[in-house]
Image (spheres, coloured by chain):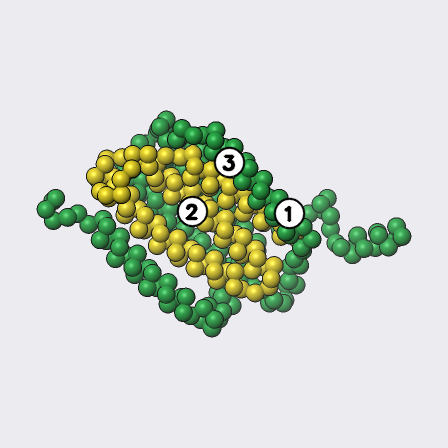
Amino acid sequence: MNPVNYLYLAALLFTIGATGVLVRRNAIVLFMCVELMLNASNLALVTFSRLHGNLDGQIIAFFTMVVAAAEVVVGLAIIVSVFRTRHSASVDDTNLMKL
Amino acid sequence: MTAALAASLSSQGHSFLSPTGVEIVFVLVGLAVLGAAVLTVSTSQLVHAALWLVVALGGLAIEYLLLTAEFIAWVQVLIYLGSVVVLVLFGLMLTRAPIGRSPDADSGNRWVALGLAVVAAGTLVTLVVDAFRCTWMDLPASGSTSVNGSTQANGEVLFRYWVLPFEALSVLLLAALVGAIVLSRRHREEG
């Protein structure tokens, strides 16, 4: 089985996620696109782990998932608190660092 | 010459015309993942985007299973499908996302972004082709345990070589928890 196919899938998925970050405007949809990009990198890591025959890639993918979960928690808290003060979840309206 | 070529071809195993079951499942699930990802990025109904994200992440879990990364596949199902998507849906509800179409969901620079995306996809795919053109991986025989991503194997590697990052991650999760509580708490004077 040619592992390049898995890496193709990872590259295309990463590109789709990056396009979403560029195109979409709602902050939470941006979050979903970031999750897609993280998952694409996870797929590449697991493929490399399979190629090289050791488990380090899988462990790093596991760590990435945990960090992504932490990122989602903090990011959603920030988005909700921004929404409370500006009544909008659009990233175009958020142009100040202060609340 | 041709006999040697034919012998080498036949010893190489199957061709594109006789795919194995793993390859068929890979192609089908991969197409489903790509389609769901495109719909996640492009649909104008925000809640539907979250549900298409579920399809994409679940398909990725199947791909992990095909790569014999069993533990990662179940962690994917538990963390992403179980908690991240639920959190994202909560976020959509809390920020009162419009149910139904929202035409202002896309930003204005759509064509620039699409051009950039095509360029990025071409670069990444040619890079991957160039780097791994001649690489093949052989699936382990059914009895051998060369690379298996089972929970036992992952746990042994995790707690033998990766203990310090693991403990650091637990501190990171605690920090994220406290940070989320602090950020989302209303101040006393506001109400």
Q: Which residue position holds label 1?
A: B129
Looking at the picture, how far across and down is residue A96, in whole percent?
A: 27, 40
Label 1 resides on the chain identified as: B
Label 3, residues with CA under 10 Å away: few <14, some 14-19, many ≥20: some
Residue closest to the eye, B134 or B30: B134
Name the residue at the left extreme: B189
Q: Which residue position holds label 2?
A: A35
Q: Secondary structure at mark 1?
A: helix
Label 3 resides on the chain identified as: B
Q: Secondary structure at mark 3?
A: helix
Q: CA distance from mark 1 to mark 2?
A: 25 Å
Looking at the picture, how far across and down is residue A8, in whole percent?
A: 59, 46
Is residue B55 something that shows in the picture? no
Shown colour of chain B: green
Q: Is B158 located above or below residue B132 in the figure?
A: below
Q: Amino acid at mark 1?
A: Val
Q: Are marks 1 and 2 in contact (CB under 8 Å)?
A: no
Name the residue at the top extreme: B103
Chain letter, yellow? A
Task: Using residue B18 as the reference point, say whether residue A76 is left or right of it.
Answer: left
Q: CA distance from mark 1 to mark 3?
A: 20 Å
Q: Which numbered disc covers residue B116?
A: 3
| Quadrant in the picture for the C terminus of chain B | top left
Residue closest to the eye, B110 or A37: B110
At x 67% / y 55%, what residue is drawn?
Answer: B135
At x 48% / y 62%, what residue is drawn?
Answer: A59
Q: CA distance from mark 3 to mark 2?
A: 20 Å
